[in-house]
């Protein structure tokens, strides 16, 4: 009994056609276009430590922003503070039992939880604001030095070298000795201390980008120097600038805390974490460790989380370090 060749060939041809029709769909499913943000997010999430650091910093930022709403008390409202509650141990309550001080109180009777929340608010505000201003100033100076070159670059970079030759803490001490205490004064001091780091970073990246073809094309089209700097050169030097900016914010917070601990930073009416640590320093040897210990832990978590985020951003934004 013989079979018709047409009948056997027809199913094979149908199967081949179905396979050929399904192949483009399969290729389209496997070749999904990944957006730059998705690629950045996936590369950042490769490090579990960076993820934990991000969530820790997110909690710290939330606490700092909404401190007036979530704090048990306003530690700087004299009507809510009782001097009889001074130096209470963690977990203590008031005499009437209405309030529990989970982290204790300081020598003035302020709730340490509320004081830390408000201290984070001031420390992050000073660090972020001084970092942004220094970033803008340093980026402009670095781009100008790299693009124009010659005597302009030599003069700017000698000024940068002179700035970086002095320890940051020494420069800040001298400036605050002249300017005095205050949030605006310490921001000015931190900007003067930090701008040179941004200028050197931007200049190094801009020197490489200056030799690219798109810069030569922009010059050939007759574009103005400032348009080339801001529209073409600046976007291509942002990755290293973001990394340095993240690390410098942590450095600014640490430097501000050091200055406030020494008593020449922020005034008593606007205490940051550094001043909170200084308030309890005299009580460390008497067993009342919590007055300095818990603000110190908050400061440590803030600086470490920001540094870990900046370290991962360096790996993600630098193609040479990508795994």
Image (cartoon, helix red, strand yellow):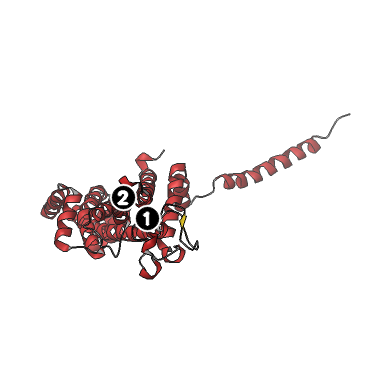
- Residue 224 visible here: no
Q: Secondary structure at mark 1?
A: loop
Q: Nearer the viewer, residue 28 or 62?
A: 62
Q: Residue at x 59, y 47 (%)?
A: 29
The outermost residue toward the bottom is: 79
The outermost residue toward the top is: 1
Q: Is residue 161 left or right of residue 65?
A: left
Marks 2 and 1 close (CB-CB < 8 Å): yes
Number of marks in the rendered image: 2
Q: Rate crowding at label 2 as few (under 14), some (14 to 19) or many (20 or more) other CA atoms within 10 Å.
A: some
Q: Residue at x 81, y 38 (%)?
A: 7
Residue 16, percent from left and from top: 69, 40
Q: Rate crowding at label 1 as few (under 14), some (14 to 19) or many (20 or more) other CA atoms within 10 Å.
A: many
Q: Is residue 280 left or right of residue 153?
A: right
Residue 41, percent from left and from top: 46, 49
Residue receiving disc 1: 87
Q: Quadrant of residue 65?
A: bottom left
Residue 243, percent from left and from top: 33, 49
Q: Residue at x 42, y 63 (%)?
A: 67
- Residue 193 visible here: yes
Residue receiving disc 2: 283
Q: Nearer the viewer, residue 2 or 165?
A: 165
Q: Tell me the distance, in whole angstroms, between the alpha carbons under discs 2 and 1.
A: 9 Å
235 relative to 8, above or below: below
91 relative to 70, above or below: above
Q: Is residue 32 left or right of residue 292?
A: right
Q: Secondary structure at mark 2?
A: helix
């Amino acid at each position: 009994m013989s079979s018709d060749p047409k009948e056997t060939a027809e199913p094979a041809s149908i199967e081949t056609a179905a396979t050929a029709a399904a192949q483009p769909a399969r290729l389209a499913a496997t070749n999904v276009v990944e957006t730059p943000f998705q690629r950045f997010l996936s590369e950042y999430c490769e490090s579990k430590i960076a993820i934990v650091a991000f969530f820790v910093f997110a909690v710290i930022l939330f606490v700092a922003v909404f401190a007036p709403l979530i704090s048990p008390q306003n530690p700087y409202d004299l009507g809510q503070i009782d001097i009889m509650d001074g130096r209470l141990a963690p977990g203590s309550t008031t005499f009437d039992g209405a309030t529990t001080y989970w982290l204790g109180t300081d020598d003035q009777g302020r709730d340490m939880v509320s004081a830390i929340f408000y201290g984070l608010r001031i420390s992050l505000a000073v660090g972020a604001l001084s970092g942004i201003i220094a970033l803008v100033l340093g980026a402009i100076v670095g781009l100008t030095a790299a693009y124009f070159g010659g005597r302009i670059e030599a003069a700017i970079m000698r000024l940068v070298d002179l700035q970086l030759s002095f320890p940051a803490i020494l420069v800040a001490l001298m400036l605050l000795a002249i300017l005095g205490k205050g949030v605006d004064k310490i921001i000015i001091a931190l900007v003067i201390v930090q701008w040179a780091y941004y200028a050197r970073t931007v200049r190094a990246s801009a020197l490489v980008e200056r030799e690219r073809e798109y810069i030569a094309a922009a010059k050939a089209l007759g574009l103005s120097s400032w348009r080339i700097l801001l529209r073409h050169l600046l976007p291509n030097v942002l990755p290293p600038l973001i990394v340095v900016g993240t690390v410098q914010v942590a450095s600014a917070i640490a430097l501000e805390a050091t200055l406030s601990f020494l008593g020449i930073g922020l005034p008593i009416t606007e205490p940051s974490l550094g001043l909170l640590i200084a308030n309890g320093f005299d009580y460390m040897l008497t067993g009342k460790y919590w007055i300095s210990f818990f603000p110190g832990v908050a400061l440590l978590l803030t600086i470490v989380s920001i540094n870990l985020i900046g370290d991962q951003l360096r790996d993600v934004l630098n193609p040479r370090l990508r795994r």
